[in-house]
Amino acid sequence: MEHKNYTKHFIFLSVLLVVFFFVNISLGSVSIPFKDLLNTLSGGIATKESWQTIVLDFRLPKAITAILVGSGLSICGLLMQTLFRNPLAGPFVLGISSGASLGVAILILGSSVFGGFLLTNSVSNWSLPIAASLGAFLVLSAVIIAAHKVRNTMSILIIGLMFGSLTSAVISVLAYFSEATQIQQYLFWSFGSLGNLSWNELSIFGLIYGLGVLGTLSLIKPLNSFLLGENYAKSLGINVKKNRNIILLITSILTGVITAFSGPIAFVGLAVPHIARLLFTSSNHKILLPAVALIGAMVLLICDSIAQLPTSEFTLPINAITSLFGAPVVIWLLVRKKRIFV
């Protein structure tokens, strides 16, 4: 009965997602008629060749990136809040994003400390994602090792926070010895960006994202059982340690690849699961997983559209928009409903 009740919700959200997708690709410093936009997307030819290039090589990849990043972070946030049974848990609590930031910091800021052998003067499209991925993988390995050694799930949360503090300290030391131009370059990366991916990078991103989401769908039963505690999950025959490790691995991989390709994007992973629970009044992950994916994708498309500053050549940092416009909405929803979990 629960599935039938929410069919209209999902149809409505899907329609909204399509609307905001078209709104997003129609905005930018260059004004493109909607007819030419549709012609280009349907495989036709736009009136101007430059319009076709702008839509296919810049706006379309950026909109798809927004959907993948928004839904991916929201799914990770839901997994972390369920595993740790903590409404303040998000995709970055394991320190994976901090590890990715450390990798980028070493690449950009490291030459001032380690000498000139680092590729700081030739940062390419691939070097930043590779450095971020290596940093994320380093912290992921440490978290997985800790998960094997520690029985208490809350201890893993604390260890993840400590990894985050440790990497932030190392980044601060690197920044202290770096030049202003290097610090500025790192700062721009830390603002987050959805518009830097080529189709090749997006295909790799999409493949890893798809594998992560498929893995998440196999966890619906364990996730529902974790809501009532690990002892309850054990009574249902759930292998708590195995499923906990799978949740940590999937969250780490998704968070790592998102941070590697788009930078650390705040707010979405923490807030969207709460919005989904308030709108759907359900704690069933069969409902919540597709709900957070749709809402997360939609939220980031809206934030990116706002960041475009229509008719302007400037683009605001996506991180600033997600927090400035998102946080008040969540505060209003929580104050109005007065409940987070159903």
Image (cartoon, rainbow, N blue to C red):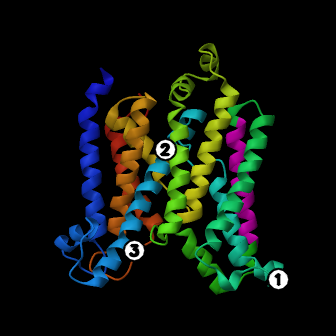
Which mark is first along the chain, 2 or 3? 3
The reply to whether the C-beta atoms of the residues labelled 3 and 2 are less than 8 Å apart is no
Quadrant of residue 111 within the rendered picture: bottom right
For disc 1, the neighbor class at 10 Å (few under 14, some 14 to 19, many from 20) is few
The residue sitting at 52% across, 51% down in the picture is 209
Question: In the picture shown, does residue 126 fall above or below 95?
Answer: below
Residue 205 is left or right of residue 168, and the answer is left
Q: What residue span does the magenta drawing correspond to? A: 155-173
Quadrant of the rendering where the N terminus is positioned: top left
Question: In the picture shown, does residue 211 fall above or below 167?
Answer: above
Q: Which residue is mark 1?
A: 115
Residue 41 in the image: state x and y as whole percent.
28, 66
Question: In the picture shown, does residue 192 fall above or below 257?
Answer: below
Amino acid tagged 1:
Gly
- Residue 263 visible in the snapshot: no
Of marks 3 and 2, the one in the foreground: 3
Residue 43 in the image: state x and y as whole percent.
27, 67
- CA–CA distance in space, label 3 to label 2: 27 Å
Q: Secondary structure at mark 2?
A: helix
User: Between residues 78 and 166, which one lies in front from this camera angle?
Assistant: 78
Q: Which residue is mark 2?
A: 75
- Residue 256 visible in the snapshot: yes
Which mark is first along the chain, 1 or 3? 3
The residue sitting at 71% across, 77% down in the picture is 109
The residue sitting at 44% across, 66% down in the picture is 318
Q: Secondary structure at mark 3?
A: helix
Give me the disc on residue 216. Answer: none
Give me the disc on residue 57. Answer: 3
- CA–CA distance in space, label 2 to label 1: 40 Å
Q: Secondary structure at mark 1?
A: loop
Amino acid tagged 2:
Ile
